[in-house]
Image (tube, helix red, strand yellow):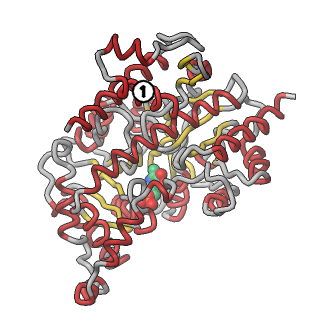
Amino acid sequence: MNELRQVFRYKQLAGEIEHKILNETYKPGEKLLSIRKLHKQSNLSISTVYKTYMELETMGLIEARPKSGYFVNPIALKQLKAPVFKKKPPTPRKVNLSSMINSVVSAINNPKFLPFGNSSMDADLLPSKHFSRILKEISHKDMKSMISYSLSEGDLELRRQLTLRTLGILEGITPEDIIITNGCTEAVALALLAITKPGDTIAIETPTNFSFLQLLKELGVLVMEVPTDPRYGVDIDELEKILHQNRIKTCLFMPNFHNPLGTIMSNDNKRKLCRLLHQYEIPVIEDDISTELYFEEQRPMPLKAFDERDLVLTCSSFSKTLAPGLRIGWIIPGMRFKEKIQRLKGGITISTSTLNQYLITQFLTSGAYERHLRSLRTALKKQAIRTTLAVKEFFPPDTRLAVPKGGSFLWIQLNPNVDGVKLYRKALDHNISIIPGVVCSNSRLFKNYIQISFGAPFTSRIEQGIKTLGTLISEYYN
Ligand SMILES: Cc1ncc(COP(=O)(O)O)c(C=O)c1O
């Protein structure tokens, strides 16, 4: 109990100092109180204050100077402006995939490259040992049911566990409201198949997750790109104009920790968005895959929490938090679309892997998930801060970046002279993979933008990778 209280206190104090550094209450390079003085001032033990400073040091916010004490890292106070919001009058268009996509996808999956293009977490941050233990404990008798088909809507215990996780977030959800899928991608695909047919128009955010563009192309639909602000999310006024002038069949949005922007929409905006879609009776597919990766106190609310007309279809998975390769996701489709989605699921894939559902269910029932999420969030937050600090240090001063409040991506706007695609190719020559911004739009926007992931522990190799990127970018200034 005492140990728990100490952890709580040092995290609270570290959070307070972090906030004061980031809101510039401290001056660059300012000396912090010595451990002894802060111990006296705060009434906290020497070891709590020491741990606080260690925590801030690992985050790169302060630095220890031998025999002098602790100082605010001047780079931490260097402010970068948020990326500029690109507005372009949208028109419905066929999906015209960037020729870069195949190359970007194969670089992401190539272990030779530094993984700045990778949307998954580093495997060291995921509980592989725990899964291996669960596998070893499966008896021959149990294995007989593991190699049989599961129900097409998914394992009941898994759906029950997911239902319990909606407590206080979504009212009245039961296991019958959830369908298990092969990852979030299948959940989104089933929702699109249930709502649209080829030739229909769908509103998407711009920029967007480039794998959505791949999926939408295969479905033969047209897309209307709605400008999306790195600070507030999808532009609701612009969407209203679009809905007024066009026949939009559905919207595909990421209100929480948008990929690639990292943006989280406020509850007020989520409410406003739902009201607008209710007014036009338009269903919206929300991808909520990164919702558990929040750095602040509370898990963000899904759009579905503001849905009074059964129009929101929520899709998610364990790919960001537990195991992308197990391909376990789910959809909460609501009553309007449930039957159709269940038929589509049965008709297309019959069911989801029984063994993989079992592994995830066992993990959830063991009670280890909350603990794992806490440590994953702490690790990601540190990685986000360290990566942002490295960008501030090594990228040119006119770089724009919005520090995310969760997720695992940074969306970076570079000088207009920088060509993200050429930079991507040069980076590959240095064994670094990044995502050029153009692949995140259907109209070749975001030429001078890149997306980088902070899903891997911040090591000297990662730091060197950011430094190399900074040098490559600087070459455009000569
Ligand atoms: C926003 C978003 N949605 C969906 C996916 C794919 O999810 P899954 O692996 O569960 O299919 C990703 C993958 O990174 C993603 O970033």
* Residue placed most toward the observer, 426 or 467: 467
Q: In the image, what residue type sits under mark 1?
A: Tyr
Please give the name of the residue rendered at 72% of the width and 37% of the height, measured from the top-left corner: 467
Residue sitting nearer the eye, 33 or 101: 33
Q: Is residue 80 visible?
A: no
Eyeballing the image, is 199 above or below 303? below
Q: Is residue 459 above or below residue 339?
A: above
Q: Which residue is mark 1?
A: 50
Kindly state the secondary structure of the residue where label 1 is placed: helix
Say which residue appears at 23% left-offset and 77% top-offset: 151
- Residue 452 left/right relative to 162: right
Left or right: residue 60 compared with residue 292: right
The answer to whether 77 appears left or right of 334 in the picture is right
Outermost residue, left side? 172
x%, y% of residue 91?
55, 42
Crowd class of label 1 (few under 14; some 14 to 19; many from 20; radius 10 Å): some
Task: For the C terminus, give its image quadrant.
Answer: top right
